[in-house]
Image (cartoon, rainbow, N blue to C red):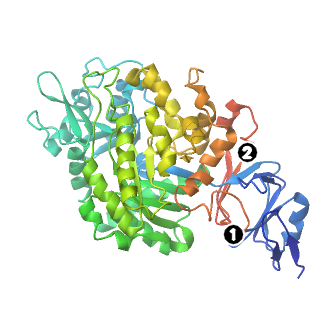
Amino acid sequence: MRVSLFVIPGLAAVAFAQPADLVLRHGKIVTMNAAKPVVEALAVRGDRITAMGAESDAQAWIGPQTKVIDLHGMLAIPGFIEGHGHFTGLGEFRMGLDLREAQTWDDIVAQVGRAAKNAKPGEWIIGRGWHQSKWKHAPESNVEGFPLHESLDKVSPDNPVLLTHASGHAAFVNGRAMQAAGITRETKDPQGGEILKDKSGAPTGLLRERAQGLVDKAYADWENKRTPAEAERYRNRVFQTAIDECLSKGITTFEDAGSPLSTVDALKRMAENHELRMRIWMMLRAPNEVLAPKLAQYRMIGVGGGFLTVRAIKRQIDGALGSRGAWLLEPYADKPDSSGLNTEDPADIYKTAEMAIAHGYQLCVHAIGDRANREVLNIYEETFKVHPELDDLRWRIEHAQHLNPADIPRFTKLGVIAAMQGIHCTSDAPYVLARLGPNRAEEGAYVWQKLMKSGAIVGNGTDAPVEDVSPLASYYASVSRKLKDGTRFYPDQRMTREEALRSYTWNNAYAAFEEKEKGSLEVGKLADITVLSRDIMTIPEDDILSTDVIYTIVGGKVAFQK
């Protein structure tokens, strides 16, 4: 057997006594490794990269059983890492009504009506993705621009309807769903939530933030009537649906932004049985009293050969801007009587911080408004002062969308990751100015460059199913900040193409303590690779959205091929 010796500057020499299992050749391979930023060929043995170099080196790595992928000049990059999404939410979204493209409330009513005709009496009708700010006009009968539940009652009198806002921070329900949840004009707002009512005091059907929990419980009670076998089949279908979509869009790792212990249990079984086809990194989402006795048991790194990691806890201090639930330092420009909602007690989040320190977990807190971000940074700073011996915690703020200028340098000072979503900028921009006014929007809305220039690590993602899980769409938003009408939202904050790709690969790996295993293509790292039809680093900007994912490779195996 011939032995080849290959050397990359800055890396150790690698001897090959056996052929590779997989070779990619005749391409442009962007590595995100400064020592060798671009190569033409790459070899994999097992689930690791074993060689990288010029096209002329590739033949030495190939044996009779080697799978060879001729890239024909296409672009290969480190596998996309979804930096913040909702794994089961993505699968469930694809199995319900997709309301993202609805242009009017009437469109949604029509969708619900069609679903009701095919539903069994009492079966819940579930949908997600509507956004009142994106409709052509407000419903004829409305409160604050939101419709009244009677319009749904007419088309679905026998079926409860639960339609989640695109942001996930509000929901609209019909009368049957409110009946199941026991919501009446006498029902008081839960802490951190609001039941929107008309002038007479009757609930309209709109539930903000934690008020959604009233109907979520009723829906869960209905779901729990399934037999264990039915529940398992449904859960597996949710998982496989989410995995299929992620792989088709080039995602090799999904950072899940908060799931209950039961979801972790199910995914752990799949990982141990080698049934996961992509990698999942998870944040636990449960009350402190539930987590406290379980944290030592549930912390796990690389189960099933590196396919499942659980090492973070998720909390949520405010809501979303679109539903006016983001917690602001000053009132909303378009609703001066409100500064948003504080959805979880900061004192309780501080207790979570101490639990995270004690058990070696990262803490990841959802914060969108500038008041919310300041409160979270304060919690982190207080915690870090008590534990000065710990200097690499990589705690995260999920979203970090709207910041007061005074808080921007605190991310770097405290070593806090800004886990952001490029696509939110262009998706939200049409109503950001209305909510914040131009001064606050320019100073602190989606200020990627201001954060990066201060030294902060900025991740990227989609918050799926809030947005399409497509990394290419979020990458495009990150480098263009271009809206549908062709205007650009504060273009000085755009990322360069290299910055945007790094935010979706190495930065996300770093934000999960996984940069030694993934996030760049280097000898010894996991062979997680995405192959694209076009070179997104050089093609005209508007061609990025028409780029296709051709291969998604996870651990050296082709998990998706177009």
Q: Residues within 10 Å of mark 1 (few under 14, many from 20)?
A: many
Depth order, front residue of 354/32: 354
Q: Is residue 349 above or below residue 428?
A: below
Q: Residue at x 40, y 56 (%)?
A: 384
Q: Nearer the viewer, mark 1 or mark 2?
A: 1
Q: Position of residue 173 (x, y in %)?
A: 25, 37
Q: Quadrant of residue 341?
A: top left
Q: Is residue 191 above or below residue 226?
A: above
Q: Position of residue 109 (x, y in %)?
A: 33, 29
SS at mark 1 in the image = strand
Depth order, front residue of 401/126: 401
SS at mark 2 in the image = loop
Q: Quadrant of the N terminus?
A: bottom right
Could one spot residue 429 in this view of the protein? Answer: no
Residue tagged 2: 533
Q: Position of residue 12 (x, y in %)?
A: 79, 70
Q: Earlier in the sequence, mark 1 or mark 2?
A: 1
| Residue type pointed to by label 2 | Ser
Residue tagged 1: 48
Q: Residue at x 25, y 53 (%)?
A: 220
Q: Quadrant of residue 157?
A: top left
Q: Quadrant of residue 475?
A: top right
Q: Position of residue 194 (x, y in %)?
A: 21, 35
| Residue type pointed to by label 1 | Arg
Q: What whole-number distance in Å separates the C-alpha atoms at marks 1 and 2?
A: 24 Å
Q: Residue extending furthest bottom?
A: 1
Q: Residue at x 35, y 24 (%)?
A: 106
Q: Residues within 10 Å of mark 2 (few under 14, many from 20)?
A: some
Q: Residue extending furthest left?
A: 186
Depth order, front residue of 554/192: 192
Depth order, front residue of 261/36: 36
Q: Residue at x 51, y 33 (%)?
A: 425
